[in-house]
Amino acid sequence: MSLYYEAAALLANPDKTGGSLKSRVYKKKDLKSSPAQLFALLTESAKWSVVLKGVVERSGLLAAERKLTPVLAILLTHDLLASKRGIAAPTNHVLKLALERHKARLAAEFSKARIQGGYATLQALREAIENGQLNEEERGIQHTAQHPRWVRVNTLKSTLEAQIRTTFKDFAKVDGLGQITSASRGSKIYYVDNNIPDLLALPSKTDLSKNLAYLRGEIIFQDKASCFPAHLLHIQPQDGDVIDGCAAPGNKTTHLAAIVQNQIHSELWPSPPKIIAFEKDKTRALTLKKMVELASAHEVVHIKAGRDFLASRPDEREFANVGVILLDPSCSGSGIVGRDDTTTMHLPSATPTEGGAANKDKKRKRAKSTHQPNNSTAVINLDLEDASAEETAAQDRNIDRLASLAAFQLRILTHAMRFPNARKISYSTCSIHSEENEAVVVRALRSPAAKENGWELLKRQDQVAGLRNWERRGWLSNDKSWDIDVSEEEKDAVLDACIRCDKGTGDGTMGFFVAAFVRDSSLEPEQPTPARTKDTEITSGGVDEEEWNGFSDDEDLALVTKDNISAQTEPSGRKKKQRRRK
Ligand SMILES: C[S@@+](CC[C@H](N)C(=O)[O-])C[C@H]1O[C@@H](n2cnc3c(N)ncnc32)[C@H](O)[C@@H]1O
């Protein structure tokens, strides 16, 4: 099989092998071509596909050459037009012959696209592609603002000042984010964010992956929007313990830990607080553990590996001092922007005649994949590395999927509302769909859990300064997303309390949503009732031990035991005293 057929087969992935593109290429046993050559061909072609898609479409290549698929067309035109080596096949190879027949037309279309895009030379176009500065629009290639590389300084290990003095000593400070999003490759500049403390923006392709500060966990790559939930909770010493209900890979958990740790020396803090981090998926819990340890958050964070937050009992003694809950549940991921370790292959559509009945019988060979040849917006999204993302980007807006995600998100939110001493909850998603966002918030407010326990939305005027001033508030992505009877006044109040980040804006964030709930302070919380013996058995030692499938030194179990002991010996006046201080 030629290099190109092998590459196309790897993309089509008919066996549905999991993992990143890199692991699929390098782990495949029976390859004829070299894995390095295959990986380079696929990733480079994907980068260039933003330009090559239009070139192939305008040349009529797919209509004329029936043996070509959209993927093969991109791979071959890449090597023909953009690679110094040319097409890696013998002169008489059927694919090479097919491309050679259209070489003049393809080259002309390629030059036209380059000139229309404003690139005087091929080298200039190459640099723009390397920098990810091109975006596909209907009529050609366009420049696009770059998504910054956001870096949160982990104050558990370092300070903003120390990082500026060391890691970023060769970088110049700029006053506007615009200078970061329009910076050219390799620019050594940084911008200190004015909404979130200890957050820096750097030009998109700044590679810090081998930097010591990153490897030591002193800095963490975290999108600005993803820092909103922990900041919005505005945790105070008297708030008690914190639950992170959906924790892996741990960006928000470690952010919470940094916030809590900064205040730990406060006299107001009645006892060392803990952050209880639930993660249902055992594999992701391992990533969480690594991240927590690297960030030096392990003294504060107690990981509940493989544990479902929905199965937790709010009235367990262990949670008696939980005053704050952060919920960042699984969502459609529709707000995610391409990470540096992802790439997209844009596929050319076939000619208008291709989908016609006459052609249907011709049984043309087309690689099976997520794309359809006649879909002009067809893309294949590729994870290059086996990185652990907060969420996986959604391919489409599937109504049924949104409805089931929204039902799960509502369940998790209303479950949190039943923790007897909880006073603050944040709810966030990296989705742009209001079905998963504003609609979940309204339904939660209407739920018995909210009404019985006196939960209401944290109004904009009561939000922490950096987020009160944030201009992007809630909105409805479509009228049907909110099929609840809500007065205009109520709707305005809800939308104003909700915070949005939109992708592709000058804010340089991903698409994101967050809202916070607070408890009506006139309602005295119920004293937590000790869980019955049977329930204790269900949620502690015995079952955990059976289910445990992760770390060998079972710190979760140790914690449960310790907490149970401390709960039993804790003076009962402590919680009352704390509440009086509020
Ligand atoms: C969006 S991700 C969380 C990202 C994380 N908050 C961060 O900032 O790094 C959602 C996580 O919740 C986990 N999850 C989903 N349902 C859960 C449940 N019922 N209990 C605990 N974890 C859950 C998923 O496995 C996934 O790792």
Image (spheres, helix red, strand yellow):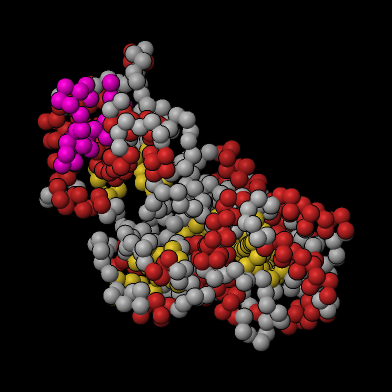
**Position above or below: 78 against 134:** above
Q: Quadrant of residue 463?
A: bottom right
Q: Which residue is depicted at the point 26% across and 66% down?
A: 187
User: Seen from this angle, which residue lies furthest bottom?
Assistant: 267
Which of 449/287 is in front?
287
User: Seen from this angle, which residue lies furthest right?
Assistant: 533
**Is 166 inside the magenta-drawn segment?**
no
- The answer to whether residue 68 is left or right of residue 525 is left
Picture coordinates of residue 469 (x, y %)? 49, 72
Picture coordinates of residue 32 (x, y %)? 32, 31
- The answer to whether residue 206 is left or right of residue 466 is left
Q: Is residue 439 visible?
A: no
Picture coordinates of residue 330 (x, y %)? 58, 50
Q: Which residue is depicted at the point 77% across and 60% down?
A: 314
Q: Which residue is depicted at the point 23% across and 38% down?
A: 78
Q: Quadrant of residue 20?
A: top left
Picture coordinates of residue 325 (x, y %)? 66, 64
Q: Is residue 122 visible?
A: yes
Count of labels shown?
A: 0
- The answer to whether residue 267 is left or right of residue 198 is right
**Quadrant location, the N terminus:** top left
Question: Magenta residues, as a range?
Answer: 67-95
Q: Which residue is depicted at the point 46% across and 63% down?
A: 222
**Is 85 inside the magenta-drawn segment?**
yes
**Position above or below: 131 against 150:** above
Which of 168/437 is in front?
168
Which of 414/100 is in front?
100
**Quadrant location, the C terminus:** bottom right
- The answer to whether residue 458 is left or right of residue 83 is right
